[in-house]
Amino acid sequence: MKRLLQLILLVAAATIPMLAQQQPRFRVLAFYSEKVEHDHVDFAHDAIRFYRAAGEQDHFTFATTTNWEDMNAAKLADYDLVVWLNDFPHTPAQRSAFEQYMEHGGGWLGFHIAAYNDRGTKWPWYVSFLGGGVFYGNNWPPLPATLIVDDPSHPAMQHVPKSFVSPANEWYNWKPSPRENKDVKVLLTLAPSNYPIGMKDVIKGGDLPVTWTNTRYRMLYTNIGHGDRIFTSDVQNRMLEDMILWVGPQKTPK
Ligand code: ZN
């Protein structure tokens, strides 16, 4: 009997660390839409491939859905992080579920058009969540741009140089700039040397934060996310991986 007990303890000692290793560091649910602007669908498909591969290496799960009705309390309770790749919730029930999730410690990573809002959006909580900026304009066509890192010590920025060229993207302008909000920490900014940027639609100047966090929430937004060129830069890829590793692992209260 004593030997059996010893055997059980030995097996347990060997198995428990293995089980611990197999636990994902965090669980992601990524929402996207197939029936939106073609370039935004391309980005979503590329991002899913990229983050699935990153998840295998960095030990997080990356589930995806095109059904925005999955934005409900029961479903979100299983995930530490919600990602919006190319759209945002449009019904009051989906929006309310997301608000509750974020107000209770849920995580969010949003790309590009996920933060789009104008007079027609009619979701004041979301504008405040993003830091107050309303979509004001964009360049066209998509173009590469030099970006400046605002805080090189931030974990999401730790592996990129202070300035680098980001592949072709459609860059959004916001009014007011989210930087004016004291709760917002800007991590990445379009370098003034890019101006004027665009041909058909031109951004001539101004403060253009590209990536930021509203420190009142566990969230990170980046304007990067238009078209099929986004994941062509090793430098930027590392940053996009670091971004999800920073915002993802914190615990979500159930
Ligand atoms: Zn776009």
Image: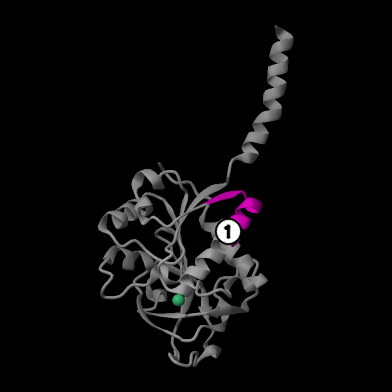
Which of the 4 quarters of the picture holds residue 24?
top right
Picture mark count: 1
Picture residue at 69% right of the left edge, 20% below the top: 9
Question: Is 8 on the left-hand or right-hand side of 93?
Answer: right
| Residue 228 is one of the magenta-drawn residues | no
> Is 151 or 165 nearer to us in this picture?
165
Give the quadrant of the N terminus.
top right
Picture residue at 42% right of the left edge, 73% below the top: 37
Q: Work out whether residue 27 can be spotted.
A: yes
Question: Is 57 on the left-hand or right-hand side of 30?
Answer: right
Residue 56 x, y percent position in the rendering: 63, 51
Q: Which residue is mark 1?
A: 51
Residue 248 x, y percent position in the rendering: 52, 54
Which of the 4 quarters of the picture holds residue 18?
top right
Highlighted range, magenta: 49-62
Vertical side of 73 occupied by 88: above or below: below
Q: Secondary structure at mark 1?
A: helix
* Main secondary structure type of the part rendered in magenta: helix
Residue 166 x, y percent position in the rendering: 59, 78
Give the quadrant of the C terminus.
top left
- Does the closest atom of ligand 1 sit within 8 Å of the Cβ of label 1? no
Question: Is 59 on the left-hand or right-hand side of 223?
Answer: right
Vertical side of 33 occupied by 29: above or below: above
Residue 194 x, y percent position in the rendering: 54, 89
